[in-house]
Image: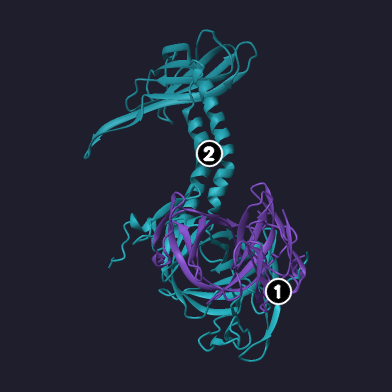
Amino acid sequence: MTGSSLKPKVFSCTGCGASLTIEAVGYTNTVVCKHCLAVIDVNHPLKKIITQYENNHVREPLFELGSFGNLNGIKWKIIGYIVKEDVASGFLWDEYLLYNPYHGFCWLLEISGHFSIAKKLNAVPCAHSSSYASEFEYNKKNYKLFNVGKVKTAFVLGEFYWRVKAGDTVTMADYISPPEMLSSEIDGSEINWSSSFYISSKEVYSAFKLSPKRTPIFDIGVAANQPNPTGDRLSKYKEFFAALAGLTVVAMASLLTMPTKNLYTFNDIVAESTPVWNSSSNAVSAGPKPAISPSFKIEGMGNIGIEMSSPVNNEWVEASMSLVNEDTGQTFDFEQGVEFYSGTDSDGAWSEGSRYSDKIISSVPAGNYHLEVELKSNKPIPTASLVIKRNSMMMMNFIFAFAALVLPILLLAIRGHSFEVKRWENSDFNPYLRNGGYDDDDE
Amino acid sequence: MTKSFNCPSCGAKGEFRSPASLFVVCQYCKASIVRNENELINLGQISEIAEDNSPLQLGATGEHASKTFSIIGRIRYQWSDGFWNEWHLFFSDGSSAWLAEAQGEFFLTREYKPKELPKAHEWIVGAVIYIDQANFTVIDIKNNEVQMSEGELPFRAHAGDKRKTADLRPILGAKFATFELDVESRKISCYLGESISLQNLKMKNLRVHDDWK
């Protein structure tokens, strides 16, 4: 059996006689003439005009009524346009009624340049009692109360399957779990729920043709149900960060398990020759002959740590050292010093510097080594002690590595947080204000 | 199990596909016929036609809970703010169900027979009623009239017949319930079901729209 095909119905406007069409024949009961703005009851045998002059032309729709667009693989036709107004603030936003004979209706919402697709929800996700719940769980998601307020229909155009006219007022409550939002609309004893989903403006502008009378709207601020992009990025990089952090921990653990080994302790080195007084530099230099340690063996791969100490007081000692590989002749030259000053002034006793210092020489290969030390000082006969160690821990390296890993996460988290702060600025239930020390009653 | 008959009005041959059908509209002369025992009573012709763009039609088929069905009848109701359709589904296992179509949405319901049903004067918006292990709230009450009917139906639905319905939703959840009072016979029926899409029902032989081919 094949019946007749589906066709729009054409009729003449009761107000101005213009030719009007009804796409959703049988569902539609109200048509608003685009020419004279009369609101017509199309189920009435005489197509009675309900109102005409209260419908103020607030603005042109972004997308023309009657145009088609594909969203998520479904072809929709724009058949209705409503401008809604938040009664308390006078803020306006737009709603487009979309129709497909096989999928029914849905709405395209445009709020400050942000878009959402809304559908009627055939379920009661949360029962309203005397007051609104601050949050609830529905389909394993947590929804938070975002706004409650009176919403007025400011302007209507096109066809609708319910009785609609400018001036109609309902109480709405929005609950968010971005990118989703659940909204309840209370009209007398009737409660209707809808669910909306944030979609990118790029998707909308590529789906529907812009009206020649309008230009695209730049999105302002953060929409109630706009997904937090940082959250996405954080979760996208989570595995990468986890892997890096894991590697660092493994590297650290393997270095920690490498024992620190004392190779040689050079006690009380005394400059061998008689000190020479240099009048121009006002310093005493130790003899030209360096102190030489006996041969010691360095095994494996790693660093060498040198701890130096000297009993200085208002003096300095500097050691010029050469770590000489006896097998290859490779030399590591470096300097290390200690200085310590103390005294008393009007503020009391003071001290500066330390009698102790340490130094790390990276990547010293295995082999037989000895250390040559020359001391310089402002002390007539400088002395120093040196402890030479294999695999001295370089804690700083790990601190840097961790900082490098944690910093981007931290920055993302801060950005994510400021996104949430911006989102909730538009809410009457802003959690960042409740505990933030701000108060509506502030002077 | 089809049972054929001759229309008491025009004599054309017709058939009952479902043994549960007690009402049929002759597809030729549009006479409403009530099946009473072995007698066919002619209620007269229906002049009303359904002027709508419903994608459904008699003969459309689909599938639900692994059983196939075909649409064998429809009642179109009228109320103060518009119309809605009740499509009579005849399943391969011989059972009947309804596909309610309102405001572009579809609800698949089956008759549910609880021990007791609240009387029509107890239907008040906001009242909580316990049905099939759940509490339902009355969300809407309407007075309706049969605008037209077609095909075969399990009860009388002649143009002008009056009904009173109460729509109910669970306190939480996605189910749907309706109480229906036949104003003439004072009989109350209860239907339980949930919202469903035509895509989920794998509907075939739907009406075609040139813009959505």
The three-letter amino acid code for the residue at tag 2 is Ala
Q: Which chain is purple?
A: B
Q: Position of residue A210 (x, y in %)?
A: 67, 73
Question: Residue at point 64% right, 77% down?
Answer: A214
Q: Is residue A313 above or below residue A181?
A: above
Q: In the rendered image of this protein, which colour is used for chain A?
A: cyan
Q: Position of residue A293 (x, y in %)?
A: 50, 10
- Residue found at the far front of this picture: B38
- The image shows residue B80, relative to residue B13, as above or below, that is below
Q: Is residue A291 above or below residue A317?
A: above
Where residue A238 sits, quadrant-wise, is: top right
**Tag on residue B30?**
1
Residue sticking out furthest to the bottom:
A16
Give the letter of the chain under mark 1: B
- Do callouts 2 and 1 mark residues in contact (Cβ within 8 Å)? no
Q: Locate residue A287, reporting x and y percent.
A: 46, 17
Between circles 2 and 1, the one closer to the viewer is: 1
Q: In the drawing, what numbered circle is on residue A404?
A: 2
Q: Quadrant of the C terminus of chain A?
A: bottom left
Mark 1 lies on a secondary structure that is: loop
